[in-house]
Every structure is written in structure tokens, then in C-alpha cells.
Image (cartoon, rainbow, N blue to C red):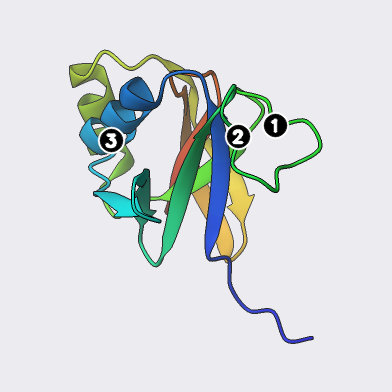
Amino acid sequence: MNIRDIDHIVLTVTDLPRTLRFYHEVFDLPIITIDGDRQAVLVGKQKINFQVVDEPHEPVAGQPTPGSADLCFIAKDPIESIQHHLKSYFVNIVAGPVERTGAHGKLTSLYVRDPDNNLIEISNYQA
């Protein structure tokens, strides 16, 4: 098997409009419509699909649970600009900036939570 990429992930959420608004407004991710009426956001070449906890899309994970994800986004903006942007949207920074190790080297990261309490790491690769 020759797996080389991740196409999408699915987050289980409690309030789809609130979640879409957060990811679109705070992270500037475009909202797309898939499968006729479902909505997702694009993240580079990947996408995040959403399912509402009481209306899952089959097949589902063993225990689809809001707030159980831990994701890392790579941003091109300087970490100081990201901090300012998050504060302008009243998004609480729960940790950072801190140094971490990503898939391709050293990162500088900030951590926030989305409306369902998923942990979102926003990072820059260090030069």
C-alpha cells in the first residue's frame, strides 16, 4: 500500500452553524458544500467535514464525540500576527507560543479551542 496524503477528517460537532462560522471567520477557511447539502471547510489541499452529534453520517467512528480532536494547522503568518488576529476575534489562547516538533521539523505553536472544545494548534515551521 502506498499512502501519501490525508484527504479529509471528520469532526463531530454540537452546532454546525456555530462551527462553520468559527472556522470560516477565525481561520479564514472557505466553506464548501458536498454531497448535495453537507458543508465542510477547505484547509489547503484537505478538508474538514462536520457531522452533528445527533445526526451522524454513516459509517462513523466507534464513539463520535464532540471535543475529542486535537489538530495542527500550519500558517504562513508570523506567530505574533496570529496572536493578534486571535485576540481580535476574542479567541482565548490556551498555550503558547511554544516550540514543538511537526512532521517536517521544528514548529512554533499557539493552542486554542474551537466551539466544541477541540484543541487546535496553529503553527509556523521554524526556518
Quick one: label 3 or label 2, which is nearer the N terminus?
2
Mark 3 to mark 1: distance in Å? 30 Å
At x 35%, y 48%, the residue is: 41
Q: Amino acid at mark 3?
A: Ile
Mark 3 to mark 2: distance in Å? 33 Å
Residue 126 at least partly seen: no
At x 45%, y 24%, the residue is: 114
Vertical placement of residue 16 versus 5, above or below = above
Instruction: Tell which tag, 3 or 2, sits nearer the viewer.
Output: 2
To which quarter of the image does residue 10 belong?
Answer: top right
Q: Position of residue 103 (x, y in %)?
A: 62, 62
Q: Amino acid at mark 1?
A: Pro
Mark 2 to mark 1: distance in Å? 8 Å
Side of 77 relative to 38 (left or right) = left
Out of 117 and 75, give the one closest to the viewer.
117
Q: Which mark is residue 64?
A: 1
Q: In the rendered image, which residue does mark 2 sit on?
A: 56
To which quarter of the image does residue 83 belong?
Answer: top left
Q: Position of residue 58 (x, y in %)?
A: 66, 45
At x 78%, y 30%, the residue is: 63
Q: Amino acid at mark 2?
A: Pro
Q: Pointer 2 and pointer 1: residues touching (CB < 8 Å)? A: yes
Vertical placement of residue 94 versus 50, above or below = above
Label 3: how many Cα within 10 Å (few below 14, some 14–19, many 20+): some
Q: Pointer 3 and pointer 1: residues touching (CB < 8 Å)? A: no
Considering the numbered disc 3 on the image, is that residue within a helix, a strand or a loop? helix
